[in-house]
Amino acid sequence: AEILSYKADIICLQEVDASIHDSLISPVLRTKGYQGFYSNKVTSQQEGCSMFWSTSVFEMARTEDMQEFPLRSLLTKDAPLDESEYFNAKSTVRDLVELERWESMNGIRQLLEAHDEVRRVYSESVGQILQVVRLSPKQSTPSEQSCSSKPDSIVVANTHLFYHPMAGHIRLLQAFAICHKLDQIRRTDPESPAPLLICGDFNSDPLSGAIRLITNRSVLPQENDCWKHLNIYTWECGDSDYMMDHGFIGNYDPDDTLSCCIEEDFVDAHCDEASIMESMSSDDSIDDISPPAVVLPSCFPTLVSGCLNLPSFTNYATDFVETLDYVFASEPSVQEPYGFRPKGEAPMPSEEEVKQYVAMPNKAMPSDHVALVCDFEWVKKEQ
């Protein structure tokens, strides 16, 4: 009922149970005029992402326009890295200089080659998925089409990044890989790249490396703490005992059989940095390996948040409160005249409203995440 109440043109969902998608979400939304698809994580878990779009706003998408990509496959040596498709016969020398290539990919692949644990986690262990669809907005009349601010098509992405609090560097690599893949997809017509909408649970706060890359276009080794666990984090840090011992989960009273929240005992898990370092230090620890600079090239569009006011939180659990979910859209530019302008977002619940139920989910809020509902308008920049 909540999803339907928003009357959204595009719906992106994460942490969707496959059986719930098939038996409830998809049948209901299809009867309401939506088309969509589900993509399962590359794990044994029957969980993944779903996206839907209104067929009254967009043309019916073809099967080949709906794609899914395991994030682990986007940085491998076999993943394409040929940027020649970005340039055409009309490109000038100046164009080729300004449209710098995705040079950071080389440094990232060198890191994966040199760092066994990062490669094991990113390329072999994590199962996150990227959903992508190319949508064509409906035009009312031929005359409207000739002067419309709507592009011929847009590319919409939906994803859910890796969760572990010590794996900010993994999420940064995932964010870069997503941007690289989307830039390839949106350039089916090199002379008219499609505008972008990117939605997802990034499991990243606004100052994290992943979000800084998207909003500031670069993350240098010395300017963000997302690299601080590069030579410390291992896949085994995700074990429940480790997460509990280091304060990442388990904000509860061990003497209380109901395991209720003790607000005064809540501490930021990052405060336990000293014990983490001590527990991970050993003679066979990973040798220090320097991180690469991660930079988005000028050929990738500038992205703007759909929320004019950054939410205080989008996730409110008993042991963790943070903004983790985002909607980003590409702005128009001189090179790419079509884009989006954010108009506003739906009201978010206050902390006081959530606290009366202790945390989320609860009887009034069925998820531990708040839905982000953003309005955009089509924009065409005059050239």
Image: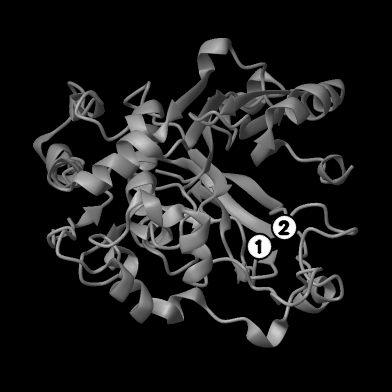
Q: Specify the amino acid type for callout 1.
A: Thr
Q: How many marks?
A: 2
Q: Which mark is residue 111?
A: none
Q: Which mark, residue 314?
A: 1
For the point 75% across and 22% down, which residue is it? 22
Circle 1 SS class? loop
Q: Residue at x 20, y 65 (%)?
A: 221
Q: Are marks 1 and 2 in contact (CB under 8 Å)?
A: yes
Q: Quadrant of residue 38?
A: top right
Which of 132 and 239 lies nearest the eye of the viewer? 239
Question: x%, y% of residue 347?
Answer: 78, 64
- Residue 3, image x, y percentages: 81, 42
Q: Which residue is mark 2?
A: 370
Quick one: label 1 or label 2, which is nearer the N terminus? 1
Q: Quadrant of residue 287?
A: bottom left
- Horizontal placement of 225 versus 322: left or right? left
Residue 252 position in % (x across, y down): 69, 73
* Residue 297 seen by the camera: no
Spot occupied by residue 309 in the image (x, y as percentages of width and height):
63, 69
Three-letter code, disc 2:
Val
As measured in the structure, the alpha-carbon distance from the residue carrying label 1 to the one carrying label 2 is: 5 Å
Task: Using the rendered image of the protein, determine whether residue 314 is visible from the camera's viewpoint.
Answer: yes
Q: Is residue 349 above or below residue 158?
A: below
Crowd around label 2: few <14 · some 14–19 · many ≥20 (10 Å): many
